[in-house]
Image (cartoon, rainbow, N blue to C red):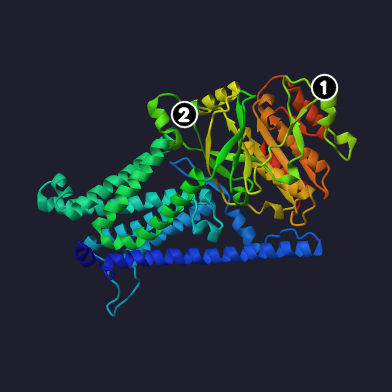
Amino acid sequence: MSEDLISHFRPTSNFHQAGYTYALIMWGLFLVYCILYQVGKCRTYWTRYKALKTGLPQPYHPGFVARALHKLEYTIRLPVVGDYMAVKHLSILSFILVLNTITILFAPFTFGSDGYMLPAVSQMDRRAAYVACVNFSFVIIFGSRNTMITKMSGISFEQLIPYHRWLAKLGFAEMITHIVWRIMVEAQRSGTAMAALFVDIEQGTGTIATLGYLILYVTSLGYIRRNYFEVFYYSHIVGIIVSVAASMWHEVGIMLYFVPPLALWLGDRAIRSYNSWYQATSVLEIDGSTDTITRVVFEKDHAKSSYRPGQYVFVAFSGGVNGYGRFKRLFTWANWHPMTISEVHHNARHRKQEIVEIQDNLDYSAEEKKDMSISSSSSSTAVQYEDVGYRQVPTPQSDHSLVGSLHIKTLGNYTTRLRDIAHKGSHSIKLRVDGPFGSPLDFADQPVFVAISTGVGVTPSMAFIKDLVERRSQGLATVETNTIYFIWSVATEEHTKAFLPLLAECAQMAENSVQSLSFVVEINITREGQPGHLDMLRRLSKQHKWQLVYQRINPQETIQRISSSHPH
């Protein structure tokens, strides 16, 4: 069997040359990008080092290239498809399309005395198939979360996912040309197309690989991906195993393209399995005080050092959150959902800190109120008890533990059941956490930080803002941000209730910051009606000079207004 595989390995074949030429070009370009990125990171660290050494601000000033590349972030609407795509992404995709075409036609770019002759059609389809396999190898890599690729390039998994989808579609289109042509050729020999599917091992393994690719393509359609995520996810795993195994049996030479990314993918799965199954996670608090938002506070061992603001995790709850019945209980730990970490509670420095919390039906004695008061350098900025109460910040059990909060919006059956369990005050619920994921942003190098959010999508913004305010208020010289704009659009005042404690804490820290820090808050309430449904919001707005606007947000006008206040 091994001798047969070796005999079928033809590294100098015409179609194999097209594959490795394309792979070398793509990896070479990617390596150049990684080098440029690492040079930029060294420049950033050197700037921060000078700021720490001299004590003088070192604001980030983008150069000509950075300003030119920023223009490519402009999005345009694609005809027919209707989706929006950044000019940068469209340019890269167009380049890849042209490179695929040139490689299939002309690789390895050698010319004889008689010039260059295009390959025959019987070779062209195989050349397209090999180039498609190279694209599929990138698809596997871009679909993995914990790989050296994101570390080398600074490109997050979320930024790579569009390329994952586009290269998958491109590779599938190229593979179709090979599939159709081979079926046509064998059908002429066998008499029917059906007989040609399994006429020999080569055709049979090709047919099985095609079925695997079809499973991947059909179950990744937008409707299935958004409404039946579990079907999409597990079909992807099955499709990858079937298509890759059958493809390597069909043509042993493509192992050169599939084995390295598969090794990275298996490594990713091993790391994620260890993080989610062997790093202990516990639920510290679950609060369903509002009908729209459920707040979950969790602690995860040995995850503190890996967290960066704005990151997210995959969570799986046990018990009635997954519904009832033997089948649903069987898949308790297979039902994972992505959630953004909205707040992180730090170590001993904050263990005695008390932050604002709305109290609905609690009555404290005068002595208790005195004990729970917030100390402030300015009495004019202190939050009065008759407006709010206080809660103690959750305390990590270990200096290496990550204690984070999730604000989960009630949308479907899963989140509705979670809210109902929170209302009942059940403490039997268990949680597993996979992550955190997401590439960090160097937002602390910018003098002005602007966060525009809608609804529960505010969670990443809150994480960024709290991190900036905490570090700036402590006097860290590496934080250049001196002005923070927080623009938040919600349907009703009631929707702000779950986030008011964290927002009030940030405002309190900004007012008492060691370094100068301006924290501007503008909350847009879009639903028509009389204001005043939540008196707490109005009182805090008056105290911290937040602006309440009872109309829809105009993003373009808002950006222009902020930009005019900070010319650059």
Quarter location, residue 72: bottom right
How far from the left and from the top, in percent, is residue 84?
Answer: 51, 44
Mark 1 neighbour class, 10 Å CA radius: few under 14, some 14 to 19, many 20 or more: few
Instruction: Tell me what residue is drawn at x 75 percent, y 65 percent.
Output: 50
Q: Is residue 557 above or below residue 409?
A: below
How far from the left and from the top, in percent, is residue 35?
Answer: 55, 67
Task: Return the residue at label 2.
Answer: 322
Instruction: Tell me what residue is drawn at x 82 percent, y 24 percent.
Output: 386
How far from the left and from the top, in percent, is residue 186?
Answer: 15, 53
Instruction: Tell me what residue is drawn at x 33 percent, y 49 percent.
Output: 241
* Rendered image: mark on residue 538: none
Which mark is first along the chain, 2 or 1? Answer: 2
Q: Is residue 87 above or below residue 351?
A: below
Q: Amino acid at mark 1?
A: Ser
Instruction: Tell me what residue is drawn at x 72 percent, y 21 percent.
Output: 360
Would residue 292 be found to the left or right of residue 233 on screen? right
Which element type, helix, strand or loop, lies under badge 1?
Answer: loop
Q: Is residue 69 above or below residue 39?
A: above
Quarter location, residue 392: top right
Observer able to see residue 220:
no
Task: Return the residue at label 1.
Answer: 365
As rendered, which of 424 and 397 lies closer to the eye? 397
Observer able to see residue 443:
yes
Which element type, helix, strand or loop, lies under badge 2?
Answer: helix
Q: Where's the C terminus, which quadrant?
A: bottom right
As rendered, which of 443 and 348 lies closer to the eye? 348
Looking at the image, which residue sits at the far front? 397
How far from the left and from the top, in percent, is residue 539?
Answer: 80, 27
